[in-house]
Image (cartoon, rainbow, N blue to C red):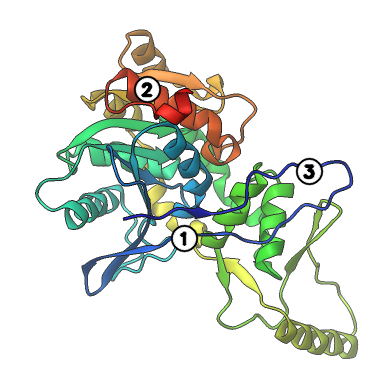
Amino acid sequence: MAGGLQSSSKMKMGPGRKRDFTPLSWTLLCITLTTWNIFRAYCSGAHGPVLLLLHGGGHSALSWAVFTAVICSRINCRVVAMDLRAHGDTKVKNPDDLSADTMAKDIGKVVEVLYGDNPPPIMIIGHSMGGAIAVHTAAANHIPSLLGLCVIDVVEGTAMDALNSMQNFLRSRPKTFKSLENAIEWSVKSGQIRNIESARVSMGGQVKKCEEPPSSPAVSNSIDGIIEEEEDEEVEEESNKKRMKEDDQEVKKESIFTWRVELSKTEKYWEGWFRGLSALFLTCPMPKLLLLAGVDRLDKDLTIGQMQGKFQMQVLPQCGHAVHEDAPEKVADALATFMVRHKFTEFKEAYLC
């Protein structure tokens, strides 16, 4: 299953050079579980253990694209990055069921369809929501050939505390964008993704074209790094009708994009993803790696577990929540070192030279 990121080399921009927000692409694979359940995955590499990558809530497998290019240059491995149910291009019969149990079973079924009764050694790696699902998958033994577990920037205590403000955060985001380039620009300038190369790939998995443009959209416009929202103003009836007519005409000229996943509607599953996660993580018997954007994210159970040597932890400072997108080289280095230390794989000769 050969594939990979179709990208330019990492961009170096001098003073005054305009940043490129045009989207990039990655090779796609369809995995059919049943007629009604088709999971999309992106694959790279031909030899070595499989790195099974699970993205965060609202994101897609495309968030792993730049990381994949880096890790495949470091160690002998294969990569399978899948769109979880109701995310990206995956289509399932019941997309509203985002319970941890259902999503963990999805992972096991995808592995079974890909590799049959004799799956290769697999290292499961998850970010945020995907990290929680990775833990649930490992704890339930849905992958019999599981080598190790890596969780990126998700800790029960911090996650549970953040749930109270999550709806406010979601409401603060633009509801629509005038183009995919505009969505990419917003993600970078708002700090959601700090790596422009990764944003150019991954935002295509987070937004989609509106099927029917809204009659008077609040379309995000980026001007000199400032994100502005059009606000409704009280005007006379005649002026209001005129403005709405002009908006409708303008919408028809543009391709309006909106979020693929309405995360606010998934709230009833949030607690199930994260409640008891630390204890579940510690009970998983395989070697474990926890990568965090800040040491303040560690809760009591994990602090004790880390002191007892139950897992390896590494803090990657100067990163946002999307650690693997912001600093793909650092994440790849940490994961490669972990896997080589445990003799899951070997460094590539070209990387050592």
Q: Residues within 10 Å of mark 2 (few under 14, many from 20)?
A: some
- The dot on residue 265 is 1
Image: 142 above or below 202? above
> Distance from label 1 to label 2 (Cα)?
37 Å
Residues under labels 2 and 3: Cα distance? Answer: 33 Å
Viewer-nearest of labels 2 and 3? 3
In depth, the one of 105 and 156 nearer the eye is 105
- Nearer to us: label 1 or label 3: 3
Choose the circle earlier in sequence order: 1 or 3. 3
Q: In this image, 296 relative to 346: left or right?
A: right
Quarter holding residue 338: top left
Does label 2 or label 3 sit earlier along the sequence?
3
Q: Residues within 10 Å of mark 3 (few under 14, many from 20)?
A: few
| 145 shown above or below 219 | above
Q: Quadrant of the N terminus?
A: bottom left
Q: Are marks 2 and 3 in contact (CB under 8 Å)?
A: no
Q: Residue at x 50, y 57 (%)?
A: 263
Q: Is residue 61 left or right of residue 170?
A: left
| Number of marks in the rendered image | 3
Q: Name which residue lies at 39% across and 40% down.
A: 126
The residue to which callout 2 is attached is 338
Amino acid type of the residue that numbered disc 1 sits on in the rendered structure = Lys
